[in-house]
Image (cartoon, rainbow, N blue to C red):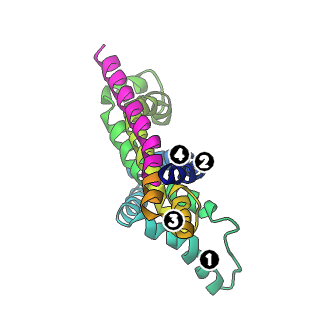
Amino acid sequence: MLYVKGFLVALQGVPVTVGVTLIAMVTGAVLGLVLALMKMSRIKVLTALASLYIEVIRGTPLIVQALIMAYGLPQLMQSIGINFRWTYLIIPAIIVCGLNSAAYVAEVIRSGIQAVDKGQMEAARSIGMTKRQAMQLIVIPQALKIVLPSFGNEFVSLIKETSVLSYVGVVEILRKGALWNAATFNTFEAYIGVALVYMLLTIPSSKLVKRLEKKMSTDSAN
Protein backbone atom coordinates (compact mmCIF):
# COMPACT_ATOMS: atom_id res chain seq x y z
CA MET A 1 0.00 0.00 0.00
CA LEU A 2 2.91 2.36 0.69
CA TYR A 3 4.05 2.03 -2.93
CA VAL A 4 0.56 2.95 -4.10
CA LYS A 5 0.49 5.89 -1.69
CA GLY A 6 3.89 7.10 -2.94
CA PHE A 7 2.65 6.87 -6.52
CA LEU A 8 -0.58 8.75 -5.74
CA VAL A 9 1.29 11.50 -3.88
CA ALA A 10 3.75 11.98 -6.76
CA LEU A 11 0.82 11.94 -9.20
CA GLN A 12 -0.45 15.16 -7.60
CA GLY A 13 2.55 16.99 -9.05
CA VAL A 14 1.71 16.05 -12.64
CA PRO A 15 -0.35 19.20 -13.46
CA VAL A 16 2.53 21.48 -12.46
CA THR A 17 5.15 19.39 -14.29
CA VAL A 18 3.10 19.12 -17.49
CA GLY A 19 1.99 22.76 -17.33
CA VAL A 20 5.55 24.05 -16.94
CA THR A 21 6.73 21.72 -19.71
CA LEU A 22 4.05 22.81 -22.20
CA ILE A 23 4.49 26.54 -21.61
CA ALA A 24 8.28 26.23 -21.65
CA MET A 25 8.13 24.21 -24.87
CA VAL A 26 6.01 26.84 -26.64
CA THR A 27 8.29 29.61 -25.36
CA GLY A 28 11.34 27.62 -26.39
CA ALA A 29 9.96 27.00 -29.89
CA VAL A 30 9.24 30.70 -30.53
CA LEU A 31 12.50 31.97 -29.06
CA GLY A 32 14.40 29.07 -30.63
CA LEU A 33 13.15 30.05 -34.08
CA VAL A 34 14.31 33.63 -33.50
CA LEU A 35 17.73 32.41 -32.31
CA ALA A 36 18.08 30.05 -35.27
CA LEU A 37 17.37 32.87 -37.72
CA MET A 38 19.78 35.16 -35.85
CA LYS A 39 22.52 32.54 -35.98
CA MET A 40 22.00 32.11 -39.72
CA SER A 41 21.90 35.86 -40.32
CA ARG A 42 24.59 37.63 -42.33
CA ILE A 43 24.67 40.31 -39.64
CA LYS A 44 27.66 39.30 -37.53
CA VAL A 45 26.39 40.97 -34.34
CA LEU A 46 23.17 38.92 -34.43
CA THR A 47 25.07 35.74 -35.18
CA ALA A 48 27.50 36.40 -32.32
CA LEU A 49 24.71 37.16 -29.83
CA ALA A 50 22.76 34.02 -30.75
CA SER A 51 25.89 31.86 -30.61
CA LEU A 52 26.87 33.30 -27.22
CA TYR A 53 23.40 32.70 -25.79
CA ILE A 54 23.30 29.11 -27.04
CA GLU A 55 26.80 28.33 -25.76
CA VAL A 56 26.13 29.81 -22.31
CA ILE A 57 22.80 28.01 -21.87
CA ARG A 58 24.04 24.67 -23.19
CA GLY A 59 27.26 24.98 -21.22
CA THR A 60 25.61 25.39 -17.80
CA PRO A 61 23.32 23.00 -15.87
CA LEU A 62 19.60 23.77 -15.74
CA ILE A 63 19.68 23.63 -11.93
CA VAL A 64 22.25 26.45 -11.85
CA GLN A 65 20.15 28.53 -14.24
CA ALA A 66 17.07 27.91 -12.08
CA LEU A 67 18.87 28.98 -8.89
CA ILE A 68 20.17 32.15 -10.57
CA MET A 69 16.71 33.03 -11.90
CA ALA A 70 14.80 32.22 -8.70
CA TYR A 71 17.20 33.54 -6.06
CA GLY A 72 20.17 35.24 -7.71
CA LEU A 73 18.20 37.70 -9.85
CA PRO A 74 16.09 39.08 -6.95
CA GLN A 75 19.23 39.54 -4.85
CA LEU A 76 20.95 41.35 -7.73
CA MET A 77 17.96 43.65 -8.20
CA GLN A 78 17.85 44.45 -4.49
CA SER A 79 21.60 45.20 -4.45
CA ILE A 80 21.03 48.00 -6.96
CA GLY A 81 18.09 49.43 -5.03
CA ILE A 82 15.19 47.73 -6.78
CA ASN A 83 12.81 45.93 -4.42
CA PHE A 84 12.04 42.82 -6.42
CA ARG A 85 11.00 39.31 -5.49
CA TRP A 86 9.08 36.58 -7.26
CA THR A 87 5.48 36.34 -6.06
CA TYR A 88 5.27 32.73 -7.22
CA LEU A 89 8.36 30.57 -7.79
CA ILE A 90 6.63 28.81 -10.65
CA ILE A 91 7.11 31.99 -12.73
CA PRO A 92 10.95 31.88 -12.78
CA ALA A 93 10.64 28.09 -13.24
CA ILE A 94 8.66 28.53 -16.45
CA ILE A 95 10.97 31.29 -17.66
CA VAL A 96 14.18 29.38 -17.06
CA CYS A 97 12.82 26.18 -18.66
CA GLY A 98 11.68 28.17 -21.69
CA LEU A 99 15.03 29.93 -22.03
CA ASN A 100 16.88 26.65 -21.63
CA SER A 101 14.72 24.85 -24.16
CA ALA A 102 15.18 27.68 -26.67
CA ALA A 103 18.93 27.06 -26.87
CA TYR A 104 18.42 23.43 -27.84
CA VAL A 105 15.44 24.07 -30.10
CA ALA A 106 17.42 26.77 -31.94
CA GLU A 107 20.00 24.23 -33.06
CA VAL A 108 17.27 21.78 -34.05
CA ILE A 109 15.48 24.41 -36.16
CA ARG A 110 18.72 25.61 -37.72
CA SER A 111 19.59 22.08 -38.81
CA GLY A 112 16.06 21.67 -40.17
CA ILE A 113 16.30 24.86 -42.24
CA GLN A 114 19.66 23.77 -43.61
CA ALA A 115 18.16 20.39 -44.50
CA VAL A 116 15.61 21.99 -46.83
CA ASP A 117 16.75 21.77 -50.44
CA LYS A 118 18.30 25.07 -51.52
CA GLY A 119 16.34 24.77 -54.73
CA GLN A 120 13.20 25.61 -52.74
CA MET A 121 14.54 29.07 -51.95
CA GLU A 122 15.71 29.59 -55.52
CA ALA A 123 12.34 28.53 -56.90
CA ALA A 124 10.52 30.90 -54.54
CA ARG A 125 12.78 33.80 -55.50
CA SER A 126 12.30 33.03 -59.19
CA ILE A 127 8.53 33.61 -58.92
CA GLY A 128 9.03 37.01 -57.31
CA MET A 129 9.09 36.25 -53.58
CA THR A 130 11.42 38.21 -51.35
CA LYS A 131 13.87 36.24 -49.23
CA ARG A 132 11.74 36.93 -46.15
CA GLN A 133 8.57 35.70 -47.87
CA ALA A 134 10.36 32.59 -49.10
CA MET A 135 11.60 31.81 -45.59
CA GLN A 136 8.17 32.37 -44.01
CA LEU A 137 6.05 30.60 -46.61
CA ILE A 138 8.31 27.93 -48.09
CA VAL A 139 11.46 27.12 -46.12
CA ILE A 140 10.39 27.40 -42.47
CA PRO A 141 7.17 25.31 -42.85
CA GLN A 142 9.20 22.52 -44.50
CA ALA A 143 11.92 22.79 -41.85
CA LEU A 144 9.37 22.55 -39.03
CA LYS A 145 7.95 19.40 -40.58
CA ILE A 146 11.45 17.91 -40.68
CA VAL A 147 12.24 18.74 -37.05
CA LEU A 148 8.82 17.87 -35.59
CA PRO A 149 10.03 14.52 -34.17
CA SER A 150 12.96 16.34 -32.54
CA PHE A 151 10.49 18.69 -30.88
CA GLY A 152 8.79 15.60 -29.48
CA ASN A 153 12.08 14.33 -28.07
CA GLU A 154 12.77 17.74 -26.53
CA PHE A 155 9.34 17.65 -24.88
CA VAL A 156 10.08 14.25 -23.34
CA SER A 157 13.47 15.44 -22.12
CA LEU A 158 11.97 18.60 -20.67
CA ILE A 159 9.46 16.59 -18.63
CA LYS A 160 12.36 14.88 -16.86
CA GLU A 161 14.48 18.04 -16.59
CA THR A 162 11.73 19.88 -14.71
CA SER A 163 12.60 17.69 -11.73
CA VAL A 164 15.41 20.14 -10.88
CA LEU A 165 12.76 22.76 -10.14
CA SER A 166 12.09 21.01 -6.85
CA TYR A 167 15.34 22.60 -5.64
CA VAL A 168 13.87 26.08 -6.06
CA GLY A 169 10.65 25.27 -4.24
CA VAL A 170 8.33 24.39 -7.12
CA VAL A 171 5.97 21.64 -5.98
CA GLU A 172 6.09 19.34 -8.99
CA ILE A 173 6.39 15.53 -9.12
CA LEU A 174 9.75 15.18 -7.40
CA ARG A 175 8.96 17.81 -4.78
CA LYS A 176 5.69 16.05 -3.91
CA GLY A 177 7.58 12.83 -3.36
CA ALA A 178 10.31 14.55 -1.34
CA LEU A 179 7.78 16.24 0.94
CA TRP A 180 5.97 12.95 1.54
CA ASN A 181 9.30 11.28 2.29
CA ALA A 182 10.18 14.04 4.79
CA ALA A 183 6.85 13.58 6.57
CA THR A 184 6.78 9.76 6.65
CA PHE A 185 10.42 8.62 6.16
CA ASN A 186 9.20 6.18 3.51
CA THR A 187 12.15 7.02 1.30
CA PHE A 188 12.14 4.03 -1.04
CA GLU A 189 8.40 4.06 -1.59
CA ALA A 190 8.37 7.84 -2.13
CA TYR A 191 10.98 7.87 -4.86
CA ILE A 192 9.76 4.68 -6.52
CA GLY A 193 6.41 6.46 -6.78
CA VAL A 194 8.14 9.48 -8.33
CA ALA A 195 9.94 7.27 -10.83
CA LEU A 196 6.73 5.49 -11.84
CA VAL A 197 4.92 8.79 -12.43
CA TYR A 198 7.72 10.07 -14.65
CA MET A 199 7.63 6.79 -16.58
CA LEU A 200 3.85 7.16 -16.92
CA LEU A 201 4.46 10.47 -18.69
CA THR A 202 7.61 9.78 -20.69
CA ILE A 203 7.12 6.24 -22.03
CA PRO A 204 3.81 6.94 -23.86
CA SER A 205 5.23 10.25 -25.09
CA SER A 206 8.37 8.54 -26.41
CA LYS A 207 6.30 5.90 -28.20
CA LEU A 208 4.16 8.62 -29.75
CA VAL A 209 7.29 10.41 -30.99
CA LYS A 210 8.61 7.16 -32.52
CA ARG A 211 5.30 6.61 -34.32
CA LEU A 212 5.45 10.16 -35.60
CA GLU A 213 9.01 9.64 -36.85
CA LYS A 214 7.98 6.42 -38.60
CA LYS A 215 4.95 8.07 -40.20
CA MET A 216 6.99 11.02 -41.45
CA SER A 217 9.67 8.69 -42.84
CA THR A 218 6.96 6.79 -44.73
CA ASP A 219 5.45 10.02 -46.06
CA SER A 220 8.89 11.23 -47.20
CA ALA A 221 9.54 7.94 -48.99
CA ASN A 222 6.25 8.28 -50.84
Does the stretch in magenta take in 211?
yes
What is the crowding at mark 1: few (fewer than 14 residues within 10 Å), some, or many (at least 20)?
A: some
Task: Nearest to the eye among marks 4 and 1: give it.
Answer: 1
Pointers 4 and 1 in contact (CB under 8 A)? Answer: no
Which of 144 and 36 lies nearest the eye of the viewer? 144
Which of 200 and 101 lies nearest the eye of the viewer? 200
Q: Which residues are magenta?
A: 194-222
Q: Which mark is residue 74?
A: 1
Q: CA distance from mark 3 to mark 1?
A: 30 Å
Task: Nearest to the eye among marks 4 and 2: give it.
Answer: 2
Q: Which mark is residue 30?
A: 4
Task: Nearest to the eye among marks 3 and 2: give it.
Answer: 3
Residue under pointer 3? 181
- Going from the N terminus, do you reach mark 2 or mark 1 first? 2
Q: CA distance from mark 4 to mark 1?
A: 26 Å
At which x and y percent is residue 212?
39, 27
Pointers 2 and 1 in contact (CB under 8 A)? Answer: no
Q: Which mark is residue 15?
A: 2
Dominant secondary structure of the residues highlighted in magenta in the image:
helix
Q: Amino acid at mark 1?
A: Pro
One can see residue 158 in this view:
no
Query: Measured along the vertical axis of the image, is residue 87 above or below residue 41?
Result: below
The residue lying at 45 percent from left, 64 percent from top is: 187
Q: CA distance from mark 3 to mark 4?
A: 38 Å
- Going from the N terminus, do you reach mark 3 or mark 1 first? 1
Does the stretch in magenta take in 110?
no
